[in-house]
Amino acid sequence: MKNICNLTMKILVASLFILVLAGCSPAKNSASQPTQAIIQIRKSLGLPGSPLKFVENTGMANSPSGGLEVANFQDREGRIYSVDPKTNQVVEIDARALLSKFSADTPSLSQVEIKAKAMAFAKNVIPGFDSLQSSLQYEEGGKVDNYFFTWYAEMSPGSMQRPFLQFAFHKSGVLFAYINTLSIEK
């Protein structure tokens, strides 16, 4: 009976040890980190939290190098979230798939209201944006029913393009594109 109790105790201790090791596994943590980054950016931008599925790893043409490797995840509504796996930063959201859902009579916000939304989003996603803003070149524009608000940093030697932050909104105020390459390591 004593041997059975000792064996049971050893099995219990070994099982707990394996569970602890599995919980600390880098593979488990690294798989959840991009998802956590997406959850955080959704909160910052007021986006809905629908389930995500991994789509693929690709290169990001809008990055300063022109080919930053990113992991892409898609939600049920069609938004594609690109995450830099080295930093677990969401560097792009492509929601152009949502644009086809708007009709010509969709209510509009004014450009001033949409710009205020872009400014609020910039402050939500970039810590210290108020102080950083003066070092960035700002541009805004529109095309048909869409508005673009972009802040550019200086181009680094060897880069293909300048790092930038951009928000693109449909006239209804719905965000359909986001790019943030300001903090990407060269």
Image (cartoon, rainbow, N blue to C red):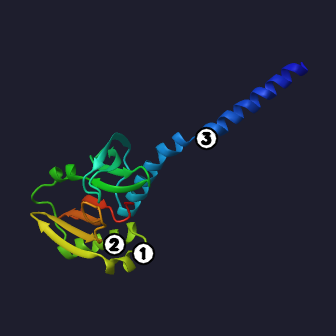
- The amino acid marked with disc number 2 is Ala
| Residue 92 location (% of width, % of height) | 31, 55
Q: Is residue 12 left or right of residue 111?
A: right
Q: Is residue 15 left or right of residue 109?
A: right
- Judged from the image, the secondary structure of the residue bearing numbered disc 2 is helix
Q: Nearer the viewer, residue 159 or 165?
A: 159
- The amino acid marked with disc number 1 is Gly
Residue named by callout 2: 120
Q: Quadrant of the C terminus?
A: bottom left
Badge 3 crowding class, 10 Å Cα cut-off, few under 14, some 14 to 19, many 20 or more, is few
| Residue 117 location (% of width, % of height) | 29, 71
- Judged from the image, the secondary structure of the residue bearing numbered disc 1 is loop
Residue displayed at 12% across by 55% down: 103
| Residue 168 location (% of width, % of height) | 22, 63
Q: Nearer the viewer, residue 161 or 92?
A: 161
Residue named by callout 1: 128
Q: CA distance from mark 1 to mark 2?
A: 12 Å
